[in-house]
Every structure is written in structure tokens, then in C-alpha cells.
């Protein structure tokens, strides 16, 4: 029988000698490591539900966790941004002395980051404390897991910043928890008990021990108990470089970005900026990209404060 070898522009081959139909590279024998990297790093994300700059870094932080999360254990730590309003300055550096002062600052953050923030809530119906939603997060962590607690944090921020809801209001907290498929009334009631504040105090102590004094703060610590602290918003490369340093590696292997379909299914809601950062595309290309990546009946595109966002179709 005559040996045949077929090729096309993609370097596909069918080779009788190797018994392979595929790419040239696949015609070779070699070991493949299917193990995930051993997670030797702990990442502590010190944050708060009403932290506008934490909302602003969501696009970059999500991509970092999606692509490099196999290298570290992710821990969410509540920092206690606002216990209550009082007569003195809350954040004098940003000119914040009373709730209404927050609105303008939040709008600036939203416009700069393109993670939409309304802010008028802080004039009409201000959040009186960030402790109630923080306690809910800790109770969810205790009773369920970190992933669901982090999802609550995300939903609370969406409600507050983009959709102008008071996330310190008991009914709002219950509704957000219910939408996660949990018993909102039971969880919020437990968070109001002494255990809720006890869990929160443990996070405050951890944040202090990590040297976190502002939000957002990300601290990467290796097995030698040495680490790097990153305060404020940074580009993706800064987080990757920090991870390289604590791992003492010159190169890391990122996971491929998830498909937009799988990401939206998991996240339920994505703002245009988040998709742009995840897939390295321009704002002007967002609609064409989404149309190409998603079947038309699986999503809805909406707009808030001049920014497009995408949700799973109901």
C-alpha cells in the first residue's frame, strides 16, 4: 500500500508512520503534566462592600483570578470602612465628612473606571454603616463557602453602585441573599446576632496583622511567610509581577481566558469594561464581540449610566 501524507494551510497531517491525524506537534511523543500548580501562595483581599475603588478594580481582579488563580488560595477579608457616621471627618483626604459628600467622590471613581456608580443614594437614603452587609458576608462564609460569600459581595456592590440600593437595609440584604438561593431572613438574622460581629472582628484583626490600612489592599504571602502588599488599583501586570516575586519564578503559565458564554453564565451580569479587560478588546468593538461569542437568545444587553451591561436571558 502506498503511504499518503495530506497537508493543508493549518499544518494538519495524516501520517501512516505515526498513526496521527492532527497537527505536526501532535505527531510526537512526550510527557504532559495535567496537575494544577501546587497552591503555595495565600492571597488576602482586604475590602469592604461600600468601597468604590474596590468596585473599580473588579475587571482586573477577575481576570487575574481567572487566569492565575491556580497559583494561590484566595481569601476575602472585610476591613470595616464605615462603622457609622459621626460629626468628625470620615475621609478628609477626599473631603468626606457626611454621607452626601460621598456622592461626588463615587461619581468620579465611576467615570474614571467606567464601572458605573450612581451615588445619589448617599444624598437621599445613605448607607449608615458597611458593617451589616459585611457581617452577612462572614455568616455566609461560615455556613456555606467563600465562593457564595464572594458572590454576595458582588451582588451587593451591583445593587449599591449601579442600581442605587441601600445595602445596609435589612430587606435589601435579605433579597440579595434570597437571589443566591439561600435563606435570606435566616442568614441576615444570624448576622445581627453577636456571632456576626465576632466573625467581623476576627477579620479586622487579620487585616491589622497584614498591615492593611486602606482599600483595596491585596497581600500575597508565600510559604516562607514573606509577601508583597499592593494597595489601590493596579494594571494586571502589577499583580502578575507580584505573584512572580513571591513564587520566585521568572515566568508563570496563565490559564486561557474562559469563553464569554461560560463567564456570563457564572457571573450573571458583566459590565462592558469587564468584558473589555478580560478579552483585550476596545469599547467600540464590544457589541460585535458579544454577538460573535454569544447566541442571541442567551443574553440581554442593557444600559445604566451610559455603560452597557450584559445579563443572562431569563
Image (tube, rainbow, N blue to C red):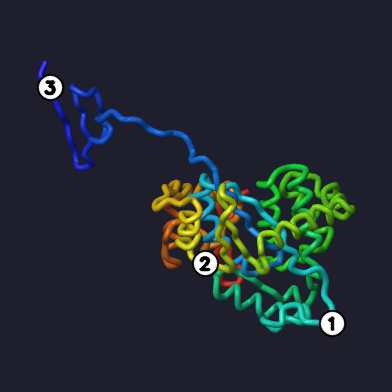
Mark 3 touches mark 2? (CB < 8 Å): no
Give 71 or 84, whichever is nearer the viewer: 71
C-alpha span from label 3 to label 1: 88 Å
Task: Give the image location of residue 261, x and y in percent.
Answer: 50, 47
Give 303 or 187, whichever is nearer the viewer: 187
Give 142 or 50, whichever is nearer the viewer: 142
Q: Is residue 86 left or right of residue 109?
A: right
Res 143 quadrant in image: top right
C-alpha span from label 3 to label 2: 57 Å
Q: What element carries label 2?
A: loop
Q: Is residue 300 above or below residue 10?
A: below
Which is in the foreground here, disc 3 or disc 2?
2
Which is in the foreground here, disc 3 or disc 1?
1
Q: Is mark 1 on a helix, strand or loop?
A: loop
Give 187 or 37, whichever is nearer the viewer: 37
Q: Mark 2 points at which residue?
A: 234
Q: Is residue 314 above or below residue 206?
A: above
Q: Is residue 303 above or below residue 250?
A: below
Q: Please give the label number shown on residue 87.
A: 1
Q: In this view, does 209 lie to the left or right of 312?
A: right
Task: Give the image location of residue 149, x and y in percent.
Answer: 70, 50
Residue at 61% from the left image edge and 51% from the top image edge: 268
Q: Name the residue under label 3.
A: 3
Work out whether mark 3 precedes mark 1 in sequence or the reverse, and give the earlier one: 3
Quarter of the figure with the N terminus: top left
Q: Is residue 88 left or right of residue 243?
A: right
Residue at 89% from the left image edge and 53% from the top image edge: 194
Q: Is mark 3 on a helix, strand or loop?
A: loop
Name the residue at the left extreme.
Answer: 2
Amino acid at each position: 500500500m502506498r503511504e499518503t501524507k495530506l497537508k493543508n494551510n493549518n499544518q494538519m497531517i495524516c501520517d501512516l508512520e505515526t498513526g496521527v491525524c492532527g497537527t505536526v506537534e501532535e505527531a510526537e511523543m512526550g510527557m504532559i503534566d495535567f496537575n494544577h500548580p501546587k497552591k503555595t501562595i495565600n492571597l488576602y483581599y482586604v475590602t469592604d462592600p461600600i468601597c468604590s475603588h474596590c468596585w473599580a478594580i473588579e475587571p482586573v481582579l477577575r481576570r487575574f483570578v481567572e487566569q492565575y488563580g491556580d497559583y494561590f488560595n484566595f481569601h476575602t477579608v472585610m476591613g470595616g470602612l464605615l462603622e457609622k457616621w459621626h460629626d468628625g471627618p470620615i475621609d478628609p483626604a477626599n473631603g468626606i465628612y457626611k454621607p452626601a459628600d460621598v456622592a461626588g467622590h463615587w461619581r468620579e471613581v465611576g467615570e474614571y473606571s467606567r464601572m458605573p456608580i450612581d451615588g445619589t443614594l448617599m444624598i437621599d437614603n445613605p448607607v449608615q454603616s458597611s458593617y451589616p452587609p459585611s457581617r452577612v458576608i462572614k455568616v455566609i462564609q461560615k455556613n456555606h463557602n467563600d465562593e457564595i460569600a464572594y458572590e454576595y459581595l458582588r451582588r451587593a456592590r451591583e445593587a449599591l453602585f449601579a442600581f442605587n440600593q441601600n445595602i445596609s437595609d435589612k430587606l435589601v440584604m435579605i433579597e440579595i441573599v434570597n437571589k443566591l438561593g439561600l435563606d435570606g431572613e435566616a442568614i441576615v438574622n444570624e448576622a445581627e446576632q453577636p456571632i456576626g460581629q465576632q466573625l467581623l472582628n476576627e477579620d479586622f484583626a487579620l487585616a491589622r496583622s497584614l498591615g492593611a490600612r486602606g482599600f483595596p489592599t491585596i497581600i500575597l504571602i508565600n510559604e516562607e511567610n514573606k509577601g508583597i502588599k499592593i494597595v489601590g488599583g493596579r494594571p494586571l501586570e502589577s499583580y502578575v509581577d507580584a505573584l512572580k516575586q513571591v513564587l520566585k519564578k521568572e515566568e508563570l503559565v496563565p490559564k486561557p481566558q474562559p469563553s464569554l458564554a461560560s463567564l456570563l453564565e457564572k457571573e450573571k451580569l458583566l459590565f462592558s469594561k469587564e468584558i473589555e479587560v478580560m478579552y483585550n478588546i476596545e469599547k467600540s468593538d464590544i457589541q460585535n464581540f458579544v454577538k460573535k461569542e454569544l447566541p442571541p437568545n442567551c443574553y440581554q444587553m442593557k444600559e445604566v449610566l451610559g455603560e452597557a451591561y450584559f445579563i443572562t436571558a431569563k
